[in-house]
Image (tube, rainbow, N blue to C red):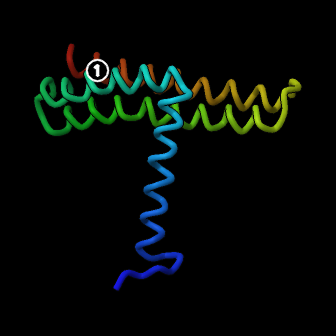
Amino acid sequence: MADSGPGGFSRVVKATQYSWRGLRAAYQHEEAFRQELWLSLILIPMGFWLGQTGMEKALLISSVMLLPLVEMLNSAIEAVVDRIGDEHHELAGRAKDMASAAVAIAIALMVVVWLLILLG
């Protein structure tokens, strides 16, 4: 018998549904996420192929997977800030800029990991 309590199996099912809904929303509404997802579909198999050791494969692949993850967090922050209001506020601008910087850092990390492993 499945546990339908707040910590039971139904919670896992609902959490999975929310996650899929979030992925669909990111794909439908965020061009940068779509681009990064398609790039991931190319780079992840390449990471398996180009990595010589399990550690290299893990670093290549995880650095790629980090980018769409950070992009979704960036988009979520932007959506919440935009929902609150259209008027410019220093804190809202700072939040959006910091989220954008996180994406830039994730891109830089991915490039550095790939260069160090492939050229090292």
Residue 28 position within the rendered picture, expressed as x and y whole percent measured from the top left = 51, 29
Q: Amino acid at mark 1?
A: Trp
| In the foreground, 63 or 11 | 11
The image quarter containing residue 95 is: top right
Residue 84 position within the rendered picture, expressed as x and y whole percent measured from the top left = 81, 38
Residue 1 position within the rendered picture, expressed as x and y whole percent measured from the top left = 34, 86
Q: Residue at x 68, y 34 (%)?
A: 79
* Rendered view: 33 above or below 73: above
Q: Residue at x 28, y 20 (%)?
A: 114
Instruction: Classify mark 1: residues with Cα within 10 Å, few (<14), some (14-19) or many (20+).
Output: many
* Rendered view: 16 above or below 22: below
Q: Residue at x 37, y 24 (%)?
A: 110
The image quarter containing residue 60 is: top left
Left or right: 40 in relation to 119 = right
Q: Residue at x 19, y 23 (%)?
A: 46
Residue wearing tag 1: 114
* Rendered view: 117 above or below 71: above
